[in-house]
Image: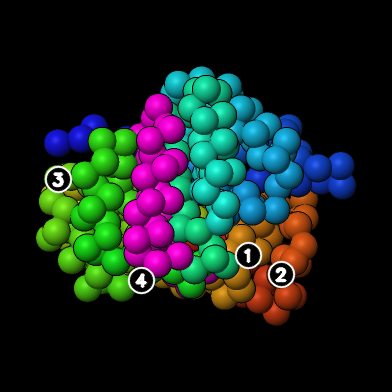
Amino acid sequence: MKTTIFEGAATAIITPLNENGIDFEAFGRLIEWQISEGIDAIVAAGTTGEGSTLTDEEHRAVIKFCVEKVNGRVPVIAGTGSNDTAYAAQLTKYACEAGADAVLLVTPYYNKATQNGLIKSFTAVADISTKPCILYNVPSRTCCNIKPETCAVLAKHPNIVAIKEASGDISQIAAISHLCGDSIDIYSGNDDQIVPVLSLGGKGVISVLSNLLPRETSQICHSFLNGDVKTARDMQLEYLPLINSLFCEVNPIPVKAAMSAMGYGSNILRLPLTPMEEANKNRLISDMRNCGIKF
């Protein structure tokens, strides 16, 4: 059995931006608040962190800053995947040297690799990594799906220890659990499917919701893992309207608006992403207040 990176909730944390670039002051406050609220891990420079539109210098700076700010209190997982395998390998090497506890490797986007291409690409990066690797399957964004049989092959690599499953396909996640067993940990990549994925043997979630509600998102996971399925289920359903609002426009547009309202940076995104439409923002703010979020 491989070592588990974390159990519970990891925040796919936003990267606060201002007119000059990264707002490290807001980023630091957000990291401190996440830890004080009991989050189980932090993912830096992933999809929600706008990793694909950060410059190479910014991407590395976000990883380094997060590692240093967290200072070993919770695991830091660095988003280092790319559609360019060579670049993903370089960034992974940097993240390992910077002290990240693990790396998150998204399926190559745009190129649309075959399953054999996925095996070769992920293997090339995992061979270079000195830290555990989490595969990230999000075909709605990448037009590329890691099939369960491919996952089973990749799970044999000693450095590939987990998968963030954001396909939304519960049958596929069940197949991964069946084929891979203890050779790979499964994390939900969708906040509306935390409990269903846990019920199939998942270890937790890599979450957008936990930017706003770190303690509560972690509690959903730990309640289930500790046998209190009813509490986990009730909380999953309680936060469903807010989760839906957080994805009514493409992530991270809504969560950036939410975190700005909570005082964590400006509502600035990198093009081609643009600020949330006013009607959707009003809905989001209303759902935040209904969940008791004060701002």
Counting every numbered tag in the picture gives 4
User: Mark 4 or mark 3, which is nearer the start of the sequence?
Assistant: 4
- Answer few, some or many: residues within 10 Å of disc 4's Cα (few below 14, many 20 plus, some between 14 and 19): some
**Label 2 belongs to which residue?**
276
**Which residue is drawn at the image coordinates 44% and 23% (left, top)?**
73
User: Mark 1 or mark 4, which is nearer the start of the sequence?
Assistant: 4
Query: Taking 91 as reference, is 233 left or right?
Result: left
User: Mark 2 or mark 1, which is nearer the start of the sequence?
Assistant: 1
4 vs 1, front mark: 4
Residue 280: give x, y in percent of width and height.
66, 76
**Label 3 belongs to which residue?**
182
- Answer few, some or many: residues within 10 Å of disc 3's Cα (few below 14, many 20 plus, some between 14 and 19): some
* Distance between mark 2 and mark 3 Cα atoms: 41 Å
Name the kind of residue labelled 3 in the image. Answer: Asp
* Distance between mark 4 and mark 1 Cα atoms: 20 Å
Magenta stretch, residue numbers: 113-141
Query: Taking 55 as reference, is 125 left or right?
Result: left
